[in-house]
Amino acid sequence: MKLLDRWKMLIGQSMALVPMIGSPMVDAGQTQLASSDWLPASGNTPPAFKNTLNAKDAVNIYAAHRSHSSHRSHSSHYSSSGGYSAPRSYSTPSSSSYTPPPTSQGSTYGSGLSAPRTAAPSNAYGTRPAAQDLSALVRRVQLALMVKKYYSGAIDGVMGNGTRGALMAFQSDSGVGINGRMDTPTLNALGIVIP
Amino acid sequence: MLRLDTQFTIKNAPQRRLFKIITPQELIEKGVATCAGNAGFEDLMLWLDDIHVTNQHSLMTLPVGGFLLAGKSLNANHFTATTLSTPKDPQVVKPGDVISVGPDSSMVRVLYRRGSNSNLLFMTDRCNSLCLMCSQPPKDIDDRWHIDENLKLIDLIDPGIEQLGISGGEPTLYKDGLLAILAHAKSVLPEKSLHILSNGRLLRDPSWIEALKHVGHKKLTWGIPLYADNAADHDHVVQAPGAFSETMAGLYNLHRAEQHIEIRVVLSKLTTIRLPELAHFIFRNLPFAKHIALMGIENTGLAKKNYKELWIDPADYQEQLSLAAWFLDIRGLTVSIYNLPLCVLDPGLRSFYRQSISDWKNLFIEACHTCAATEFCAGFFKSHSERWQSRNIHPLSREDLIHTQGARYEIA
């Protein structure tokens, strides 16, 4: 067979495929093949790899050759992948708005552990701080006054006369309003971040 | 290399407890907000230095859980609070760390080290595999107390973005505990990414899918080891029949649960022979893996015992390593090479190289003194010994670095 004949055969075979183009089967995607009645629940199906290497949205590794500097951010300390992203657009099989039911796991550890920090209710919202939070703050103020050598008494969390006197002395020296109260300018001057 | 434990003189420690070390300055500034989660003064241990000697008496009226007397001129008399003094190594415990103190031992363990690259939630000493090169051979004990310890530890850790590891043992053995820890970490430390090391075998149970989706931690990566492209070889390395299929089923379940997956391969004589085939297998069957880590062996634990079966000079597997790494890389999978000295690595592979050995167990040897690359090199594990040393160890010059591939050297 001559080379020309081979070419003719090849073209002929390709032409035979033309009627198929445009039919739904040509893409052979899952959507055409699967009907909802036999497709198992999405959560438990094996992963379906829709992305072939020549899919439209696949990254062309030759066109987008990664320069060496693209590895710059890859210095890993703890042996792991923190922050890697594969240069590939693989999309997981669509999980059709599936929401897992709130199953009780029978866990002994679940109850109340994950509650976020109970923020001390701040005065800005019109509520008074809990007594415990207040005394913790007074202790921090006493500690700060002690480090700054205004206070030498016990760090007991009680705003007594000794603490108030020390606080007013500090307020007077640092040019904030002398009122003996733990207001924001005073706490700022003491270096106390609230809450 | 800085150890994670040291001895103290301990007073008043009736039961084992965790403490967050805090300086008076930080206590003034941030209070208990220095801890990421719920914490009270009783969880804090005040760090007192020699500069605090004049105020020591008043400072020790603070109702904190304990005092760490770092200064030598302080005296350790307190009626009730836990008091630590005279550390054997004063570098080990520092402000910001979380430590564990108990009545049974004068050893104080650091569970969280501020600013470290390798903080870990240790889950258990138990394991359902017995890998030939296990660096930390499992113990068959009931150590569920780790679960509560870790839940407390999460509360006391610094907020911030560094990564936390979760390891063991096999962390999935305590399923409820692990899920509780993941959920708690998500709520208290949402900005920290987590990295779990698991053999994935128990994850073959599909109930994990629901459970992990329910937790929904977005910054969680599973590091799962796979040692061969066939069951016989993999099962031999992990010394557990059936492990290969269980791990594969576990990997698919993780993907169903939309988890980030990293495949880890420890490089030994057993795993490097068919490394290119393994790369092919991963690409074919686990193309959803976010990261493939090819890792030098840690010469400690069971690895020492199985030296003959495991040891291969890294110089002798550079070709297979190169084939596997590039095979995966050109197909778009992210590859890293860990735990090998830089000078042993094929220079063409340096773009995959990561400085990977945890800071508390890496070191450099004599040959490294004149090397220009130690700043970029993972070095050796602290357990390093001569029979585990490649014949190719040699100091690199600045010229070597300039003419090599890899991001960090091209500026020179």
Image (spheres, coloured by chain):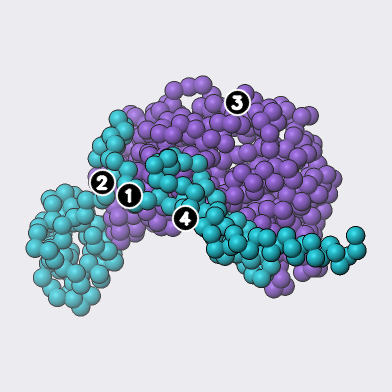
Chain colours: A cyan, B purple
Tag 2: residue type? Ala
- How far apart are labels 2 and 1 at the CA level? 7 Å
Quadrant assignment for the C terminus of chain B: bottom right
Q: Is disc 1 in the same subunit as disc 4?
A: yes
Secondary structure beneath label 4: loop
Marker disc for residue B242: 3
Q: Which chain is home to disc 2?
A: A
Residue wearing tag 4:
B162
Question: In the displayed structure, would residue B332 be above or below residue B241?
Answer: below
Left or right of A99? Residue B274 is right
Give whichever of discs 3 and 4 has the lower sequence position.
Answer: 4
Residue A123 x %, y %: 12, 63
Q: Nearer the viewer, residue B29 or B83?
A: B29
Tag 4: residue type? Glu
Residues at discs 2 and 1 in contact (Cβ within 8 Å): yes
Left or right of B30? Residue A22 is right
Residue at 34 percent across and 51 percent down: it is: A97
Residues at discs 1 and 3 in contact (Cβ within 8 Å): no
Question: In the displayed structure, would residue A45 be above or below residue A88?
Answer: above
Single out the mark in the foreground, 4 or 2.
2
Q: Which chain is home to disc 4?
A: B
Give whichever of discs 1 and 3 has the lower sequence position.
Answer: 1
Tag 3: residue type? Gly
Q: Is disc 3 in the same subunit as disc 4?
A: yes
Residue wearing tag 2:
A115
Label 2 CA crowd tier, 10 Å (few <14, some 14–19, many 20+): few
Q: Is disc 3 in the same subunit as disc 2?
A: no
Marker disc for residue B26: none
Q: Nearer the viewer, residue A65 or A180?
A: A65
Please indicate, yes or no, whether residue B42 appears anywhere in the rendered image: yes
